[in-house]
Protein backbone atom coordinates (compact mmCIF):
# COMPACT_ATOMS: atom_id res chain seq x y z
CA UNK A 1 0.00 0.00 0.00
CA UNK A 2 1.08 3.57 -0.63
CA UNK A 3 2.00 5.77 2.32
CA UNK A 4 2.75 9.43 2.85
CA UNK A 5 5.63 10.47 0.59
CA UNK A 6 7.92 11.32 3.52
CA UNK A 7 7.15 8.05 5.29
CA UNK A 8 4.52 6.89 7.72
CA UNK A 9 4.14 9.27 10.69
CA UNK A 10 4.79 6.44 13.15
CA UNK A 11 8.22 5.79 11.65
CA UNK A 12 9.09 9.47 11.34
CA UNK A 13 8.18 9.99 15.00
CA UNK A 14 10.18 6.92 16.02
CA UNK A 15 13.20 8.22 14.10
CA UNK A 16 12.78 11.62 15.75
CA UNK A 17 12.64 9.95 19.15
CA UNK A 18 15.87 8.11 18.46
CA UNK A 19 17.56 11.27 17.15
CA UNK A 20 16.43 13.09 20.28
CA UNK A 21 18.53 10.67 22.34
CA UNK A 22 21.54 11.57 20.17
CA UNK A 23 20.85 15.30 20.35
CA UNK A 24 19.85 15.64 23.98
CA UNK A 25 17.05 17.94 22.75
CA UNK A 26 13.64 17.12 21.34
CA UNK A 27 13.83 16.60 17.57
CA UNK A 28 10.85 17.73 15.49
CA UNK A 29 9.50 14.70 13.62
CA UNK A 30 8.33 16.95 10.78
CA UNK A 31 11.99 17.47 9.92
CA UNK A 32 12.37 13.73 9.22
CA UNK A 33 12.00 12.47 5.63
CA UNK A 34 12.18 8.69 5.22
CA UNK A 35 13.74 7.63 1.93
CA UNK A 36 14.71 4.50 0.01
CA UNK A 37 18.13 4.34 1.61
CA UNK A 38 20.63 6.96 2.77
CA UNK A 39 21.85 7.38 -0.82
CA UNK A 40 18.32 8.43 -1.75
CA UNK A 41 18.36 10.98 1.09
CA UNK A 42 21.58 12.42 -0.35
CA UNK A 43 19.97 12.55 -3.79
CA UNK A 44 16.96 14.43 -2.42
CA UNK A 45 19.21 16.92 -0.64
CA UNK A 46 21.43 17.61 -3.64
CA UNK A 47 18.48 18.10 -5.98
CA UNK A 48 16.62 20.33 -3.52
CA UNK A 49 19.57 22.52 -2.55
CA UNK A 50 21.93 22.72 -5.55
CA UNK A 51 21.71 23.46 -9.25
CA UNK A 52 23.58 24.66 -12.34
CA UNK A 53 26.50 26.94 -11.53
CA UNK A 54 26.68 25.89 -7.88
CA UNK A 55 29.77 24.41 -6.26
CA UNK A 56 29.71 21.89 -3.42
CA UNK A 57 32.79 21.29 -1.27
CA UNK A 58 33.44 17.57 -0.91
CA UNK A 59 35.92 16.39 1.72
CA UNK A 60 38.32 13.81 0.33
CA UNK A 61 38.76 10.92 0.39
CA UNK A 62 35.03 10.75 -0.29
CA UNK A 63 32.36 8.10 -0.55
CA UNK A 64 32.13 7.15 -4.21
CA UNK A 65 28.59 8.44 -4.83
CA UNK A 66 29.03 12.03 -3.59
CA UNK A 67 30.53 13.49 -6.79
CA UNK A 68 28.11 11.55 -8.99
CA UNK A 69 25.03 12.73 -7.09
CA UNK A 70 26.27 16.32 -7.17
CA UNK A 71 26.90 16.01 -10.90
CA UNK A 72 23.38 14.65 -11.43
CA UNK A 73 22.02 17.73 -9.65
CA UNK A 74 23.95 19.77 -12.28
CA UNK A 75 26.23 21.30 -9.64
CA UNK A 76 30.01 20.89 -9.48
CA UNK A 77 32.15 19.15 -6.85
CA UNK A 78 35.18 20.96 -5.44
CA UNK A 79 37.43 18.58 -3.55
CA UNK A 80 39.08 19.52 -0.25
CA UNK A 81 41.51 17.29 1.63
CA UNK A 82 42.91 17.54 5.13
CA UNK A 83 46.23 16.40 6.53
CA UNK A 84 46.97 12.74 5.77
CA UNK A 85 48.49 12.20 9.22
CA UNK A 86 45.25 13.43 10.78
CA UNK A 87 43.24 10.90 8.75
CA UNK A 88 42.37 13.61 6.20
CA UNK A 89 40.02 15.51 8.54
CA UNK A 90 39.54 18.99 7.08
CA UNK A 91 39.80 22.27 8.94
CA UNK A 92 38.15 25.61 8.24
CA UNK A 93 41.50 26.78 6.87
CA UNK A 94 41.37 23.96 4.32
CA UNK A 95 37.84 25.01 3.36
CA UNK A 96 38.87 28.65 3.00
CA UNK A 97 41.23 27.71 0.17
CA UNK A 98 38.38 26.18 -1.85
CA UNK A 99 35.51 28.58 -1.07
CA UNK A 100 34.20 30.88 -3.81
CA UNK A 101 31.07 32.96 -4.30
CA UNK A 102 29.60 29.95 -6.14
CA UNK A 103 29.95 27.64 -3.14
CA UNK A 104 26.54 26.50 -1.88
CA UNK A 105 27.25 23.43 0.22
CA UNK A 106 29.66 21.18 2.10
CA UNK A 107 29.54 17.40 2.53
CA UNK A 108 31.19 15.83 5.58
CA UNK A 109 31.16 12.10 6.39
CA UNK A 110 31.88 11.11 10.00
CA UNK A 111 32.79 8.36 10.72
CA UNK A 112 34.25 8.47 7.25
CA UNK A 113 33.99 5.88 4.52
CA UNK A 114 36.74 5.08 3.44
CA UNK A 115 39.20 6.35 6.10
CA UNK A 116 37.41 5.68 9.40
CA UNK A 117 38.25 9.24 10.46
CA UNK A 118 35.95 10.84 13.04
CA UNK A 119 35.44 14.55 13.69
CA UNK A 120 35.34 15.66 17.32
CA UNK A 121 32.38 17.71 18.51
CA UNK A 122 34.61 20.79 18.57
CA UNK A 123 35.66 20.16 14.98
CA UNK A 124 32.03 19.69 13.88
CA UNK A 125 31.10 22.92 15.63
CA UNK A 126 33.84 24.77 13.77
CA UNK A 127 32.71 23.36 10.41
CA UNK A 128 29.04 24.14 11.13
CA UNK A 129 29.86 27.71 12.21
CA UNK A 130 31.98 28.20 9.09
CA UNK A 131 29.16 26.94 6.85
CA UNK A 132 26.48 28.97 8.61
CA UNK A 133 28.48 32.18 8.35
CA UNK A 134 28.54 31.68 4.57
CA UNK A 135 24.91 30.54 4.30
CA UNK A 136 25.94 27.09 3.06
CA UNK A 137 24.07 23.81 3.40
CA UNK A 138 26.12 21.41 5.54
CA UNK A 139 25.32 17.80 4.63
CA UNK A 140 26.41 15.56 7.51
CA UNK A 141 26.56 11.90 6.50
CA UNK A 142 26.46 10.01 9.80
CA UNK A 143 25.41 6.56 8.58
CA UNK A 144 28.30 4.98 10.56
CA UNK A 145 27.68 6.98 13.76
CA UNK A 146 27.09 3.92 15.94
CA UNK A 147 30.23 2.12 14.74
CA UNK A 148 32.63 4.09 16.89
CA UNK A 149 35.74 2.92 18.73
CA UNK A 150 36.26 5.74 21.20
CA UNK A 151 35.89 4.93 24.88
CA UNK A 152 34.56 8.39 25.76
CA UNK A 153 31.01 8.01 24.40
CA UNK A 154 28.59 5.46 22.95
CA UNK A 155 28.55 6.93 19.44
CA UNK A 156 30.60 9.26 17.27
CA UNK A 157 29.98 12.98 17.76
CA UNK A 158 27.01 14.30 15.79
CA UNK A 159 25.89 17.64 14.39
CA UNK A 160 22.70 16.98 16.35
CA UNK A 161 24.66 17.72 19.51
CA UNK A 162 25.41 21.26 18.36
CA UNK A 163 23.29 24.18 19.60
CA UNK A 164 20.11 24.51 17.55
CA UNK A 165 21.11 27.91 16.18
CA UNK A 166 24.26 26.36 14.70
CA UNK A 167 22.61 23.42 12.97
CA UNK A 168 19.74 25.20 11.22
CA UNK A 169 21.47 24.87 7.86
CA UNK A 170 22.46 21.22 8.42
CA UNK A 171 20.95 18.19 6.72
CA UNK A 172 21.66 14.96 8.59
CA UNK A 173 21.88 11.78 6.50
CA UNK A 174 21.33 8.45 8.26
CA UNK A 175 19.64 5.09 7.85
CA UNK A 176 19.07 1.62 9.24
CA UNK A 177 21.51 -0.44 7.17
CA UNK A 178 24.51 -0.03 9.48
CA UNK A 179 22.83 0.56 12.84
CA UNK A 180 20.36 -2.33 12.60
CA UNK A 181 22.32 -4.40 10.04
CA UNK A 182 19.32 -3.99 7.71
CA UNK A 183 21.23 -3.87 4.43
CA UNK A 184 18.94 -4.41 1.47
CA UNK A 185 15.80 -3.11 3.19
CA UNK A 186 16.51 0.29 1.64
CA UNK A 187 15.41 2.60 4.43
CA UNK A 188 17.33 5.81 5.02
CA UNK A 189 16.27 9.17 6.35
CA UNK A 190 17.28 12.79 6.53
CA UNK A 191 16.70 15.28 9.31
CA UNK A 192 16.70 19.01 8.73
CA UNK A 193 14.77 22.17 9.46
CA UNK A 194 11.11 21.40 8.60
CA UNK A 195 11.16 23.98 5.80
CA UNK A 196 14.12 22.21 4.18
CA UNK A 197 12.41 18.87 4.82
CA UNK A 198 9.39 20.01 2.79
CA UNK A 199 11.67 20.61 -0.20
CA UNK A 200 13.25 17.17 0.19
CA UNK A 201 9.82 15.54 0.38
CA UNK A 202 8.74 17.45 -2.73
CA UNK A 203 11.71 16.11 -4.70
CA UNK A 204 10.89 12.59 -3.46
CA UNK A 205 7.24 12.95 -4.44
CA UNK A 206 8.23 13.50 -8.06
CA UNK A 207 10.91 10.80 -8.20
CA UNK A 208 10.10 7.66 -6.20
CA UNK A 209 7.14 8.58 -3.97
CA UNK A 210 7.10 6.74 -0.65
CA UNK A 211 9.69 4.16 0.44
CA UNK A 212 8.53 0.54 0.30
CA UNK A 213 5.78 -0.04 2.87
CA UNK A 214 7.05 -3.41 4.19
CA UNK A 215 10.51 -1.92 4.71
CA UNK A 216 9.04 1.01 6.62
CA UNK A 217 7.20 -1.38 8.93
CA UNK A 218 10.37 -3.42 9.50
CA UNK A 219 12.33 -0.26 10.34
CA UNK A 220 9.56 0.85 12.70
CA UNK A 221 9.82 -2.46 14.54
CA UNK A 222 13.57 -1.96 14.92
CA UNK A 223 13.14 1.54 16.36
CA UNK A 224 10.39 0.31 18.70
CA UNK A 225 12.87 -2.21 20.12
CA UNK A 226 15.70 0.28 20.51
CA UNK A 227 16.97 -1.07 23.85
CA UNK A 228 17.49 -4.52 22.37
CA UNK A 229 19.02 -3.03 19.25
CA UNK A 230 21.46 -0.94 21.27
CA UNK A 231 22.62 -4.04 23.12
CA UNK A 232 23.25 -5.74 19.78
CA UNK A 233 25.14 -2.65 18.59
CA UNK A 234 27.37 -2.85 21.68
CA UNK A 235 28.13 -6.50 20.90
CA UNK A 236 28.78 -5.63 17.25
CA UNK A 237 31.13 -2.78 18.20
CA UNK A 238 33.15 -5.03 20.49
CA UNK A 239 33.68 -7.36 17.54
CA UNK A 240 34.66 -4.46 15.29
CA UNK A 241 37.15 -3.14 17.86
CA UNK A 242 38.72 -6.60 18.11
CA UNK A 243 38.93 -6.91 14.32
CA UNK A 244 40.28 -3.38 13.95
CA UNK A 245 43.05 -4.13 16.46
CA UNK A 246 43.75 -7.44 14.76
CA UNK A 247 44.10 -5.88 11.30
CA UNK A 248 46.27 -3.04 12.63
CA UNK A 249 48.58 -5.57 14.26
CA UNK A 250 48.72 -7.75 11.14
CA UNK A 251 49.45 -4.79 8.87
CA UNK A 252 52.29 -3.59 11.09
CA UNK A 253 53.74 -7.08 11.37
CA UNK A 254 53.21 -8.52 7.89
CA UNK A 255 52.97 -5.42 5.66
CA UNK A 256 55.20 -2.77 7.27
CA UNK A 257 55.81 -1.14 3.86
CA UNK A 258 52.15 -0.06 3.69
CA UNK A 259 51.36 2.86 6.00
CA UNK A 260 47.96 3.72 7.46
CA UNK A 261 46.21 5.76 10.12
CA UNK A 262 44.14 3.61 12.47
CA UNK A 263 40.39 4.20 12.04
CA UNK A 264 38.25 5.61 14.83
CA UNK A 265 34.95 4.41 13.37
CA UNK A 266 33.23 2.56 10.48
CA UNK A 267 34.90 -0.72 9.44
CA UNK A 268 37.62 0.22 6.97
CA UNK A 269 41.36 0.76 6.77
CA UNK A 270 42.64 3.16 4.12
CA UNK A 271 46.14 1.89 3.45
CA UNK A 272 48.82 3.64 1.42
CA UNK A 273 49.91 1.44 -1.48
CA UNK A 274 51.84 3.82 -3.74
CA UNK A 275 55.09 2.09 -2.72
CA UNK A 276 53.85 -0.81 -4.88
CA UNK A 277 53.52 1.31 -8.02
CA UNK A 278 55.86 0.40 -10.87
CA UNK A 279 56.66 -2.90 -12.61
CA UNK A 280 53.46 -2.56 -14.62
CA UNK A 281 51.36 -1.38 -11.68
CA UNK A 282 50.60 2.24 -12.54
CA UNK A 283 47.98 3.08 -9.94
CA UNK A 284 45.61 1.74 -7.32
CA UNK A 285 43.41 -0.04 -9.89
CA UNK A 286 46.40 -1.96 -11.24
CA UNK A 287 47.66 -2.89 -7.77
CA UNK A 288 44.24 -3.98 -6.51
CA UNK A 289 43.58 -5.99 -9.68
CA UNK A 290 46.98 -7.69 -9.31
CA UNK A 291 46.33 -8.59 -5.66
CA UNK A 292 42.85 -9.88 -6.52
CA UNK A 293 44.11 -12.05 -9.36
CA UNK A 294 47.24 -13.36 -7.67
CA UNK A 295 46.17 -13.56 -4.01
CA UNK A 296 42.38 -13.72 -4.23
CA UNK A 297 41.93 -10.74 -1.90
CA UNK A 298 39.58 -7.91 -2.88
CA UNK A 299 40.34 -4.30 -2.00
CA UNK A 300 38.76 -1.14 -3.39
CA UNK A 301 41.17 1.12 -5.32
CA UNK A 302 41.72 4.52 -3.75
CA UNK A 303 40.97 6.18 -7.09
CA UNK A 304 37.30 5.42 -6.44
CA UNK A 305 37.52 7.67 -3.36
CA UNK A 306 39.57 10.44 -4.93
CA UNK A 307 43.09 9.40 -3.83
CA UNK A 308 44.94 6.99 -6.10
CA UNK A 309 47.74 6.41 -3.58
CA UNK A 310 45.53 4.29 -1.35
CA UNK A 311 43.25 1.25 -1.19
CA UNK A 312 40.39 0.42 1.16
CA UNK A 313 40.26 -2.76 3.20
CA UNK A 314 37.04 -3.79 4.97
CA UNK A 315 37.22 -5.67 8.26
CA UNK A 316 33.50 -6.52 8.31
CA UNK A 317 34.25 -10.23 8.20
CA UNK A 318 35.58 -13.00 10.45
CA UNK A 319 38.91 -12.91 12.27
CA UNK A 320 40.06 -16.03 10.42
CA UNK A 321 39.38 -14.52 7.01
CA UNK A 322 41.18 -11.31 7.98
CA UNK A 323 44.27 -13.28 9.07
CA UNK A 324 44.20 -15.27 5.84
CA UNK A 325 43.69 -12.20 3.65
CA UNK A 326 46.60 -10.22 5.13
CA UNK A 327 48.73 -13.36 5.00
CA UNK A 328 47.98 -13.86 1.31
CA UNK A 329 48.89 -10.26 0.48
CA UNK A 330 52.09 -10.52 2.50
CA UNK A 331 53.09 -13.75 0.73
CA UNK A 332 52.46 -12.16 -2.67
CA UNK A 333 54.56 -9.09 -1.85
CA UNK A 334 57.34 -11.28 -0.45
CA UNK A 335 57.59 -12.93 -3.89
CA UNK A 336 58.11 -9.52 -5.44
Image (cartoon, rainbow, N blue to C red):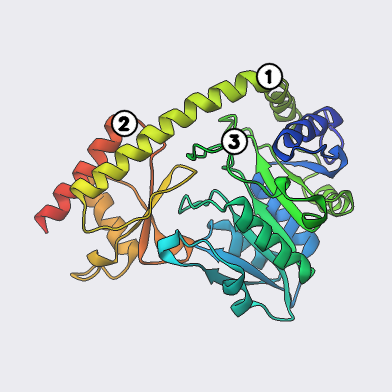
Q: Measured along the vertical axis of the image, is residue 36 above or below residue 120?
A: above
Q: Which quadrant would the C terminus be assigned to in this image?
A: bottom left
Residue 225: which disc?
A: 1
| Quarter holding residue 2 | top right
Q: Is residue 139 visible?
A: yes
Which sits in the foreground, 188 or 100?
100
Where residue 328 appears, as percent x and y from the top left, is: 20, 44
Query: Label 3 to label 2, Cα distance in Å?
Result: 22 Å
Helix, strand or loop under label 2? helix
Residue 177: which disc?
A: 3
Helix, strand or loop under label 1? loop
Query: Label 1 to label 2, Cα distance in Å?
Result: 29 Å
Residue at the image point whose x is 56% and y is 21% from the top = 231
- Compare marks 1 and 3 and give the one earlier in the sequence: 3
Residue 84 appears left or right of 279: right
Question: Does the CB distance between marks 1 and 3 fall below 8 Å?
Answer: no
Where residue 276 appears, as percent x and y from the top left, is: 23, 64
Which sits in the foreground, 5 or 24?
24
Residue at the image point whose x is 80% and y is 42% from the top = 32
Question: Which residue corresponds to mark 2?
Answer: 319
Where residue 253 appears, as percent x and y from the top left, is: 19, 46
Q: Measured along the vertical axis of the image, is residue 129 above or below residue 99?
A: above
Q: Is residue 37 visible?
A: no
Query: Label 1 to label 3, Cα distance in Å?
Result: 16 Å
Which sits in the foreground, 296 or 41?
41
Question: Does the CB distance between marks 3 and 2 fall below 8 Å?
Answer: no
Q: Which quadrant would the N terminus be assigned to in this image?
A: top right
Amino acid sequence: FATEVAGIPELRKAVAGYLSTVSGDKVDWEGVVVSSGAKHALFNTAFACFGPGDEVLVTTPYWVSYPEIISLSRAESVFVSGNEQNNFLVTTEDLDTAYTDRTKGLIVCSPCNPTGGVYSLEQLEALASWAKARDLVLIADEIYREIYFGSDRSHAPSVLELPKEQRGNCVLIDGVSKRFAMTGWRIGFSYSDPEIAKKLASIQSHSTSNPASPSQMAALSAFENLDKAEEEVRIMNKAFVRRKDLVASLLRERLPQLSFVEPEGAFYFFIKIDSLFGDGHNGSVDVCSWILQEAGVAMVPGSAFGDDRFARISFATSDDLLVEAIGRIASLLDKG
